[in-house]
Image (cartoon, rainbow, N blue to C red):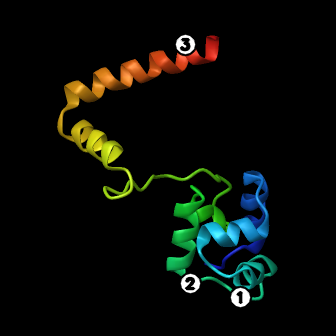
Amino acid sequence: MKFRPDRLIQLRTSMNISKAEAARQLNISAMTYGRYEKGEREPSYPSVSYIAQIFHCNIDFLYGTSDVMNCDYIVISRSESPELYSLVETLQQNHDIKDRILAYARELNRNEKRG
């Protein structure tokens, strides 16, 4: 698989951020990021995985094997989001609570769309 710089540009544009902001969020130099977008340098697979994780994108989209930009999974860190991590852990262990919370979330979503 070959990294597709045009997909990185498309992703950044869809997020409405500058190259400098993209580089800042990825914790890389603006020069390195610019080289990725220009196709002068190809990021390693771990770097592409990190880009996808930080920008909530599908890795396959960045390689051009899928046209679906949205990610297939979300990484939740216990240290960064302890409450959310705990909630997901509870949902995985207790299917009754999971079903009730999902029903509640759907209802909240419906009400938000109406109002």
**Count of labels shown?**
3
**In the image, is 26 to the left or to the right of 91?**
right
Q: Quick check: marks 2 and 3 in contact, CB under 8 Å?
A: no
At x 33%, y 58%, the residue is 79
Q: Earlier in the sequence, mark 3 or mark 1?
A: 1
Asked where in the image residue 6 lies, by quadrant, the reply is bottom right
At x 52%, y 70%, the residue is 50
Q: Earlier in the sequence, mark 2 or mark 3?
A: 2
Residue 44, disc: 2
User: Which residue occupies the foreground of this view, 38 or 3?
Assistant: 38
At x 77%, y 88%, the residue is 40
* Residue 72 image position (x, y, % from top left): 49, 52
Kindly identify which residue carries mark 3: 111
At x 31%, y 49%, the residue is 82
Q: Amino acid at mark 2?
A: Ser
State the SS at label 2.
loop
Q: Residue furthest left?
A: 93
Disc 1 residue crowd, few under 14, some 14–19, many 20+, Cα 10 Å: some
**In the image, is 55 to the left or to the right of 40?**
left
**In the image, is 113 to the left or to the right of 97?**
right
State the SS at label 1.
loop
Q: Amino acid at mark 1?
A: Arg
* Residue 110 image position (x, y, % from top left): 54, 15
State the SS at label 3.
helix
Kindly identify which residue carries mark 1: 41
How far, Cα to Cα, is label 1 from label 2?
Answer: 9 Å
Q: Is residue 4 above or below residue 77?
A: below
Q: Is residue 63 visible?
A: no
Q: Amino acid at mark 3?
A: Asn
Nearer mark to the viewer, of 2 and 3 = 3
